[in-house]
Amino acid sequence: MNDIPKPLLATVNQAELTDFVARYDQPSFRTKQLLDWVFHKRILVPSQMKNIPLVLRNALEENFCCCSSEVETIDCAGDATEKLLINLRDSNSIEMVIISSPERKTFCLSTQVGCPVQCYFCASGADGLIRNLNAGEMVEQLYHGSERIDALPDNIVFMGIGEGLLNFNNLATAIGIMCDHERLNISPRRITVSTSGYVPGIAKLAQLNLPLNLAVSLHAPNDTIRAKLIPEKMSYPIAEIIEACNAYRANTGRMVTFEYTLIAGINDMVPAAEELAAIARQNRVKVNLIPYNPVSGTEFKRPELSALKNFEAVLLNRGVQTTMRLEKGSSVNAACGQLRASGKK
Ligand code: SAH
Ligand code: SF4
């Protein structure tokens, strides 16, 4: 018995396939055919690779873990959102979400099982970090979603379960596979990394020298309000976060977005909106307002529609580029980590 885990097929690169094809005395054009099956047709099942000889298909099964995860349930939120609960090979589970609009399809991907940041309002962090996802498990989420829509997504956001910047190397490898011209060939401009504000990670992301979008979950215009939402031992002062965002914009040329999850009585007041508007304008960031989806076991509540609208109006009146998605399907485990949490009960 060989206990060494096999590499995941979704992470293989051209050089490794060239080597693999040569080891089985196959002509070199097989490399291109295999790249075509795995990354362009997005087929991870060797028996479906019709023009590949049996010996090589069997060799793929022997040498690689062809797909390490599978979709357990699909939860439709009633609007244009589908949430896939995905089982991993160690029987942990994660989620990926497909968000459809007439213009585009966006995939929301997870980066960890659980989350070490443990924001008080978030279902993903309830049990802390279980483990990091490897790069192949992140890419496989994209495959499961693509099978559902029969295409690659228009946009990818790493806003599912986990703090991706605390699993930096695996996240960077997954993004590398997605952006590689020989493999999935997705533009980094269509990929967004969301972080709770892990400052050293923002600096490392800038060093990748890719025009990736950065979204920072600020949720508060000052450190006093922020401490009610994010445990202080896992958070950085807002001033340092802003400095890191400005450096990110300077290095990559990409504008940064602040995500702001609006929670009743905590961060949805007009003075907070005014303070946020001043910061956003001064630092030229966009703001994405997210009405809170209540999580069972927490006291946090979603603001009334009028409070959401008032908050948005303050930002818009002060010239801040602002978006707010008033999604309809909030009853169906629509927020990050909630489907996995409900499956564990
Ligand atoms: N850990 C990263 C990315 C995953 S969370 C981060 O925090 O940015 C992605 C976004 O979902 C964050 O902005 C977070 O605030 C938001 N979120 C988490 N739980 C939510 C909930 N119950 N309702 C609304 N937004 C939520
Ligand atoms: Fe982790 Fe993000 Fe949830 Fe906070 S909001 S616990 S950082 S997944």
Image (cartoon, rainbow, N blue to C red):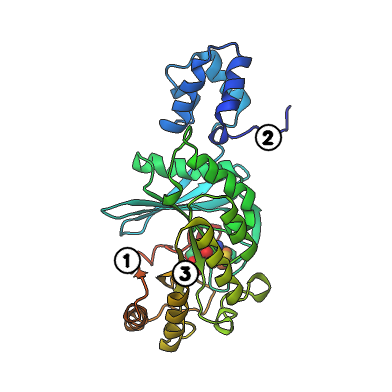
**Residue 113 appears in the picture as rendered:** no
Figure check: 265 above or below 103: below
Figure check: 21 above or below 335: above
**Residue 73 spot, x, y in % from top left:** 44, 49
| Amino acid beneath label 2 | Pro
Q: CA separation, marks 1 and 3? A: 22 Å
Q: CA separation, marks 2 and 1? A: 42 Å
**Residue with the mark numbered 3:** 258
**Residue with the mark numbered 1:** 328
312 with respect to 68 (left or right): left
| Amino acid beneath label 3 | Phe
238 with respect to 76 (left or right): right
At horizontal 27% and vertical 53% (from top left) the residue drawn is: 103
Earlier sequence position, callout 1 versus callout 3: 3
Quadrant containing the C terminus is bottom right
Badge 2 element? loop
**Residue with the mark numbered 2:** 5
**Residue 293 spot, x, y in % from top left:** 43, 70
Quadrant containing the N terminus is top right
Furthest toward the front, the residue is 250
Badge 1 element? loop
At horizontal 46% and vertical 48% (from top left) the residue drawn is: 188
106 with respect to 14 (left or right): left
Mark 1 Cα shell of 10 Å, populated few (<14), some (14-19), many (≥20)? few
